[in-house]
Image (cartoon, rainbow, N blue to C red):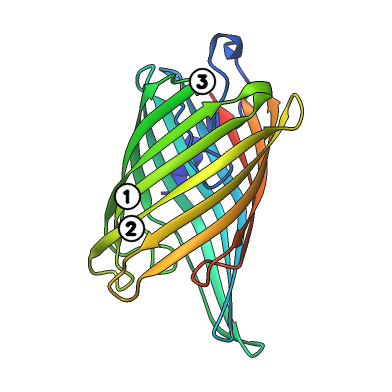
Amino acid sequence: MRPLLLLFLLPAFLPGRAFAGELRDFCPDRPGLGTPPCTIDKGHGDVEVGLADWTLDKSGGTRTDSWVFGDTLVRYGLTDRLEVQVGWTAYGTVREKSAGAVVSRMSGTGDVTLALRRNLVNPDGSGFSAALMPYASLPTGGRTLGAGTWSAGILLPVSYSLPHGFALSFTGRIEAAADADRQGRHLAYGAIAGLDIPLGEKLSATVELSGQRDQDPGGHATEVLAGLSFAYTASPDLQLDAGANAGLSRSAADAELYVGIARRF
């Protein structure tokens, strides 16, 4: 799997070609909690990599620190309105501590996720834009990051452009999610609302609020998160990003920090 990842990543760091002016504005999935409705131009693609992601969760006297490296998404435009996606997490490690002592430490790779995004209105994301995005996760990862069985769902990403570069966004989700015991599936659903804020010609910020309901047989939970992310457009085909999320409900992780990069080819 690692040689395949390198094959995907190689085009992302090659010198840019002179077609950027002929394409729509680059519209990566990163950063943030939500999903954009825009699609990659036909015959082109991108590689989006979460370089480092740290999550902190404190519960019942136990502190859990999770690190993820190389959380990779590859997108490719099949038509002007349809793209295919492949996602995979290269490496993650989880450490649990109780009363200052290390209880456990685990590491491994994540599952593979396959998706199609079909834009319904304005594939460049301008004005009012909407899409449908069915996806499925395959149990290729280990016990640390992998779910142990397949899951599938569908997203409904929507955005609406406002004056002066502002934009509203919404992502609805419904999923047959993997059970915590890794044996079956259950209903999970939620929504994410966001506001994109221009901070300059190349820099923008996004403020988001996410509410997700998980009906796992082992215990139902409602996760509420607030997110703030920044994206810097270094060139027409290259974006750098950073973000932070904060848990607002008991079942949500306390904090998350991440940085990443996206490159169109």
Q: Which residue is mark 1?
A: 174
Using a 10 Å C-alpha cutoff, classify the residue at mark 1 as few (fewer than 14 neighbours), some (14 to 19) or many (20 or more).
some
Find out whether the residues at labels 1 and 2 contact each other: C-beta distance under 8 Å.
Answer: yes
Residue 76 in the image: x percent, y percent?
Answer: 41, 27
The numbered mark at residue 127 is: 3
Number of on-image labels: 3
The numbered mark at residue 188 is: 2
Q: Earlier in the sequence, mark 1 or mark 3?
A: 3
Vertical position of residue 119 compared to residue 49: above or below: above
Q: Please, which residue is most extreme toward the front here? A: 163
Q: Residue at x 59, y 35 (%)?
A: 262
Q: Residue at x 49, y 31 (%)?
A: 159
Q: Earlier in the sequence, mark 1 or mark 2?
A: 1
Q: Please, which residue is most extreme toward the right here? A: 200
**For the residues carrying marks 3 and 2, which lies nearer the camera in this image?**
3
SS at badge 2? strand
Vertical position of residue 123 compared to residue 211: above or below: above
Residue 81 in the image: x percent, y percent?
Answer: 37, 20
Residue 257 in the image: x percent, y percent?
Answer: 65, 56
Q: Residue at x 59, y 55 (%)?
A: 226
Q: Nearer the viewer, residue 7 or 49?
A: 49
Q: CA distance from mark 1 to mark 2?
A: 6 Å
Q: CA distance from mark 1 to mark 3?
A: 25 Å
